[in-house]
Amino acid sequence: MWLEINNLHKKFGAEPVLGDLSFRLAERQMLSILGRSGCGKTTLLKIIAGLETPDAGVIKIAGKVINNVSAHRRNIVYIYQEPLLFPHLNVFENVAFGLRLRKIQNPTIESKVLEMLEALELNEQARKMPHQLSGGQRQRVAFGRALIISPQMLLLDEPFGALDTETRAVMQVLLKKIMQTHPITAIFVTHDLKEAIIMGDAIGMMEKGKLDIYPDKKTFIEHNEHVKNEINFWQNL
Amino acid sequence: MSKYLFKIILSIIILLPFAVLAVLSLGRNWAFPAVLPAVFTFDNWRVLLLAQSDLSQSLALSLFISIVIATAVTIASFFTSKFISFSPWRRRWLLIAYFPYMFAPVILAACLQYYFLRLGWAGSAGGVMLAQLFIAYPFGVIIFTGFWNERLHNMEQLVATLGGNAWQTYTRVLLPVAKGALLICFFQTFLISWFEYGLTRLIGVGKIQTLTLKVFQYVNEANVFYAALASILLAVPPIVLLWLNKRYVFVNFN
């Protein structure tokens, strides 16, 4: 397996957040993780990104232990619920940000950014500042900024949580489409059951710092009472 | 029309004191009951051109002290406030930052003077600057604590995951985003130092004659012409800073 998490432990003070958590994920797969607030989803993502240190446990990518690799060298991008666009940069420069950090030549940056903006249907907005964009457009810029550097992994922490239902559905389709053209291993954290099923190749359920992974949607539905109830509700409506 | 009239009246009220000061700074031989000075000359202003004159030395000293204080405080408080904002003891640190404002600056100066005299730091520009830091530095920290928040912390972490090291995070994101707060902090702490009287007088023990002290000295000597000239010089930096604020800081909020 490409990503291997073994016996991860994390406490904040006396409170355990992750307890002996282990899982595996194949390359270019997207794992959806469902779970209630405070169950440790964000902490898990931050540990994988290198933004938090685990108390114990091993993280391996492609067979290499990355525990001691700092966040800026991991090439794992963390996408927050809030797009967190840089307010002093326009859309073009926000998307180009990671390439500028890597000191890529200007003509290459220009062509890559324009290509990305086209894929994100943002070419009309290139010169606009973040405050001139809608919520959905901002989140698309955030995706473009992350994808353009070809990260080895993408961590999405409820990226559509702040969007309205309609925009959320559009964004789910768009992200699915982008992930097909830019296949990247990803973990997608969400509260939304439907979103988890739409987005994930595999689905995980996190509770009290433990993660159960279901290899496919069918197994997930069969083993989950809450999902069955939800399906019954819609069928009997 | 009434709005226009109001603006004119307001402008007159604001500008009149400066006009009177300007007239006085050009005057000589003004004896009662004459309405205006008998002689108008640029002689008072010419003393500024003399490197050895008290006034030009005070002006240079004040500029030096205020620029050093404002620069040092802006840099130090930017980083200190970051540490405080994300510290588990944030409230405790902030309470300490507010501590110097529990007293009037003169009382604080009286408390500090003993230690400065014992350490031999009183009566020197370095001693005065160190004393001014007791007021300006916490003020800078308080200005920046509103700047650091969870969103900025997340932004900093995001830059790291995009491949940015600490230097790139500061130069490409944090400092540009903080531009407004940095300028406000610089301007405010410059003005605190520029107009500081009590601390400067007590810690400077008469040897450090900043422009603010000079104005009081001329007033006490009843030298109205030099007092007016020094007052105009004292008012120039705040006017320049107000203009710069309007031009470069508040433009971001439009």
Image (cartoon, coloured by chain):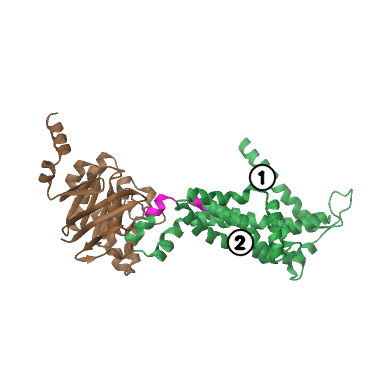
Q: Can residue B113 be seen here?
A: yes
Q: Residue at x 61, y 59 (%)?
A: B133
Q: Chain of mark 1?
A: B
Element under disc 2: helix
Tell me the crowding category of disc 1: few under 14, some 14 to 19, or many 20 or more residues within 10 angstroms, Cα based: few
In percent of width and height, residue B248 lies at 52, 55
In the displayed structure image, the side of residue B69 where residue A161 appears, left or right: left
In the picture as drawn, the residue positioned furthest to the front comes out as A14
Task: Answer yes or no: is residue B240 visible.
Answer: no
Query: Mark 2 or 1, which is nearer the eye?
Result: 2
| Numbered range of the magenta stretch | B144-154
Q: Amino acid at mark 2?
A: Ile
Residue visible at 26% across and 51% down?
A19
* Magenta span dominant secondary structure: helix
- Viewer-proximal residue, A110 or A156? A156
Q: Residue furthest top?
A: A237
Where is residue B146 drawn, in percent x and y? 49, 49
Q: Which residue is denoted by mark 1 in the rendering?
A: B11
- The answer to if A72 sits in the magenta stretch is no
Please give the chain letter of the residue carrying mark 2: B
Residue B232: where, in percent of width, then height? 72, 56
Residue to which mark 2 is pinned: B69
Instruction: Tell me, by letter, which chain the rendering colours green.
Output: B
Tag 1: amino acid: Ser
Q: Quadrant of the N terminus of chain B?
A: top right
Among numbered discs 2 and 1, the one appearing first in the sequence: 1
Q: Nearer the viewer, residue B66 or A85?
A: B66
